Image (tube, rainbow, N blue to C red):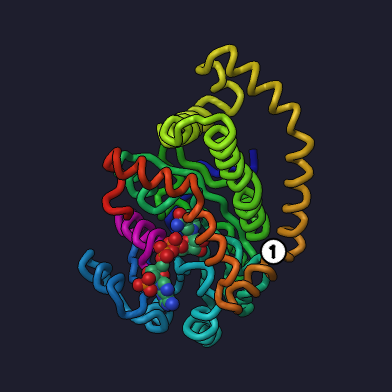
Amino acid sequence: NNNIILDYNLDLLKNKTIAVIGYGNQGRAQASIMRDSGLHVIVGNIRDKYYELAQKEGFEVYEIEEAVKRSEIGLLLIPDEIMKEIYEKKIGPIISSKKEYVLDFASGYNVAFGFIRPPGNTDVVMVAPRMIGEGMVDLHKQGKGYPVLIGVKQDSSGKAWDYAKSIAKGIGAIGLPGGVAVKSSFEEEAAIDLMSEHTWVPILFAAIKACYDVAVKEYGVSPEAALLEFYASGELSEIARLMADEGIFNQMIHHSTTSQYGTLTRFFKYYDQIKKIVEDEAKDIWNGNFAKEWTLEQLTGYPVFYRLWKMATESDMAIAEKELYKTLGRIKDGK
Ligand code: NDP
């Protein structure tokens, strides 16, 4: 299968300086694994606690502009929402003044939707881990890899795909058990990420909240029993683990026949309704309408975002959850 890459070499990265821009969740993990891989990594960050943390952890740390100046390859690992501004102020102009550069992203969003357009001398590549930084480091310590999606938006040197594969190797994704790089694109990565965020995740949340509201308010179930059944027990994470290990349907054999029958009949009953929702959401993602909606929300100071956060966290279910989690010692003083 040409889309699947299980291993590669580090030749293109050796004897080069790699700047990790942003020392947060992804930056810290990718910098430490690349250093472990024997590569020369420097960190670019604004002067704050992350800057000091990177220094304390033994990296040469510079202001972002300086790190870009000193490097041949840059990994842009700052939050997607501020990336365009930082790119335009501190990164783009410096890359333009160089002969060539390789700029790597861990998510497709800004490039896919046209917010960031690097100059023609630049290889624009994506190596997007399907995992949070801590998970990557944990697996690396166990000698294991993890899945990444890779892509190329602009191939200036003719070696952009090779750079993407080398970076995947350097950050410990491939060449180790469990590791795989899947050939994809910035557009595809951004869209499928958003598809999860706009469909099965909120649909799952809505279903759980509706179960809670109906059980507690219409059938007199206690909030504690409802919460523990619907998610607080952690059974959901067991199911998710089994889905990944054994398959979405195959894992059902671990549940009772009653459960299997109920799940299969309702799965087929609701499929068409859900598919309609997914089609509507997918359309707004792929045609860029969602990206416009989100930019507008950011420009106007996040009014909808904050209102909905408030509604969610002030709901009866969230309040009952707080009480239960306090009693169980999962949170202290509501934090
Ligand atoms: P984090 O929020 O963890 O890291 C942010 C880094 O950017 C920190 O060093 C932070 O420093 C810096 N930063 C924040 N604000 C600014 C600013 N205004 N100016 C300059 N630097 C700033 O981000 P993530 O690691 O989560 O995300 C990085 C990229 O990785 C994104 O493209 C994301 O989509 C992608 N990704 C993330 C995954 C995840 O699980 N988190 C998984 C896969 C990909 P400070 O806060 O001190 O300013």
Count of numbered labels shown in the rendering = 1
Q: Quadrant of residue 19?
A: bottom left
Ligand 1 located in image quadrant: bottom left
Three-letter residue code for mark 1:
Phe
The residue lying at 64 percent from left, 52 percent from top is 198
- Main secondary structure along the magenta-highlighted residues: helix
Q: Which residue is mark 1?
A: 290
* Residue 20 to residue 177: above or below: below
Q: Which region shows up in magenta?
A: 19-38
* Residue 28 to residue 96: above or below: above
Q: Quadrant of residue 15?
A: bottom left
In this rendered view, identify the residue nearer to me: 132 or 2. 132
- Under circle 1, the secondary element is helix
The residue lying at 52 percent from left, 17 percent from top is 255
In this rendered view, identify the residue nearer to me: 155 or 62. 62
In this rendered view, identify the residue nearer to me: 158 or 93. 93
In this rendered view, identify the residue nearer to me: 161 or 291. 291
> In the image, is residue 251 part of the stretch drawn in magenta?
no
Q: Position of residue 244 (x, y in %)?
A: 51, 32
> In the image, is residue 33 part of the stretch drawn in magenta?
yes
The residue lying at 60 percent from left, 57 percent from top is 151
Q: Position of residue 67 (x, y in %)?
A: 38, 78
Residue 20 in sight:
no
Where does the C terminus fall, quadrant-wise?
bottom left
Q: Position of residue 115 (x, y in %)?
A: 63, 74
* Residue 85 to residue 292: above or below: below
Residue lying furthest top: 257
